[in-house]
Image (tube, grey):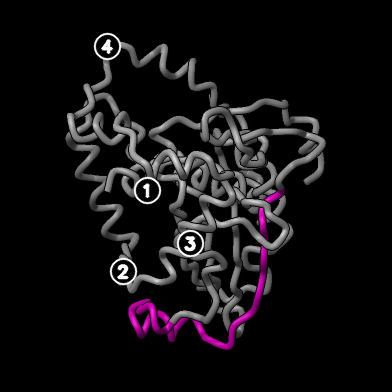
Amino acid sequence: MEGLFDFIEPGEVVLSSQDAMFSYANHPLVHFYENKGLGSSFMPSNMLQASLYSALKEFPLLLGHVRDGPGGQAKVVVDKHDLNLPEFVESESSIHFQSLKDAQFEWSAWPRGVATVGPITTPNKHGTVKLLNVHVVRLRDNSGLVLFCNIPHIILDGFGYYIFLSHWAALCRASISPGSTSDAGRVSYVFDRAFVDGRLQGQRRPLGKQIVDILTTSSFTSTALNMLSFSSQLRLASLGISVNRGEAHFFRTTRESLEELSSLACAHASGSPAGVSTYAILAAV
C-alpha cells in the first residue's frame, strides 16, 4: 500500500440510470492456480497484495465510497483521506489441488467459504459497500490456491472487470519475475465518462424501445425506491433474493479452450498481430 495515497486524486462519478439497472448485482470470478513445481514460495501473499495496491493506483474508482446522489441516484466518491480499502482475506484448506482436478472443479468439491460475498451487493456491518473483495485460499501441501475476486456490477462492467484483473496479474508477474517484459507499469486508464461519451458520438447503436421504456417509464415502485438511501435499496434487494428460491450455475473454462478461441479471434481480427488476451476473450464470451 506504500505510495498509494500519493497517486489518488479526489473525484466523484454520478452513476447513471443504466448503472442503476445493474446496481444490485455482484460480479464474482474464481481462479484456480496449481503449484506444479511445489515450490515453497508460490504466489506469496506479500507480492499478491503489493501488486494489487499497485493496480489500484490506476483504478482509483475501486477505492471510492458509494454515496447517495441527486434524484435517488448514487455516486462514487473518491477521497484520498477516506479510502474504501479492498477486503483482502486469506485462508487455508485441507483440500489438495489434485482433488479439485479429479472432480473437474465441480462446485461441490471446492473449499467451503470461497465466496466471501453473495450474489447481491450489500453493505457490511459498518454500512460500507466494499467495491473490491479478494479471498485467497491456499490448498493443502501448498499444492495451489483458489483466488476469489468480486467487484459490484455498478462499478465496472464485464470488460472493465477483466481489464482490472489483467492489469493486476501483469503487475504480479512482473514482481515475481523482474526480468519479464510488461507494459503494465506504463498503462493508464480514463474514468471520466464525459471524455468517453465525447468519443462515442455517432458510433453508438440506438437503444431499443424496450430499453428506452425501462429507463424512462416511471412507476410507484421506482419512485418509492428512489426515496430510499442507496444502502437501504441494496438491503431490500438482498432481502428479496433471500426469500426467493433460485438456481445458480458455475461455468468453468480451461486455458486450452481459451487459447483456441484466442487463435480463432486472431485469425479473423485484421491488424492485431499482438493477439487477443485471455481476459478479452472472457469479456466477449
- Asked whether residue 55 appears in the rendered view, the answer is no
Q: Position of residue 276 (x, y in %)?
A: 33, 39
Residue positioned most to the front: 220
Residue ID for mark 4: 202
SS type, badge 3: helix
Q: Which mark is residue 267?
A: none
Circle 3/circle 2 CB separation < 8 Å = no
**Label 4 environment density (alpha carbons within 10 Å; few <14, some 14–19, many ≥20):** few
Q: Which residue is mark 3?
A: 238
Task: Tell me the residue at 66%/46% (across/down).
Answer: 178
Tag nearer the camera, 3 or 4: 3
Q: Amino acid at mark 2?
A: His
Mark 3 or mark 1: whose residue is earlier in sequence: 3
Along the polypeptide, which appears first: circle 4 or circle 2?
4
- Dividing the picture into quarters, in which one does residue 35 lie? bottom right
Q: Position of residue 22 (x, y in %)?
A: 40, 45
Residue type at numbered disc 4:
Gly
| Residue at image mark 2 | 249
Range of residues picked out in magenta: 85-109
Number of marks: 4
> Residue 69 is drawn in which quadrant?
top right
Q: What is the three-letter code of the residue carrying label 1?
A: Thr
C-alpha gap between disc 3 and disc 1 = 32 Å
Name the element at disc 1: helix
Image point 57% across, 52% down: which residue?
232
Measured Cα–Cα span from mark 3 to mark 4 = 39 Å
Q: Report how far apart the C-alphas of labels 2 and 1 lie in the structure.
A: 21 Å
Q: In the picture shown, does residue 152 fall above or below 182?
A: below
- Crowd rating for badge 1 (residues with CA inside 10 Å; few <14, some 14–19, many 20+): some
Q: Position of residue 231 (x, y in %)?
A: 59, 50
Q: Indicate whether residue 97 is drawn in magenta.
A: yes
Residue 260 vs residue 108, the one in the foreground = 108
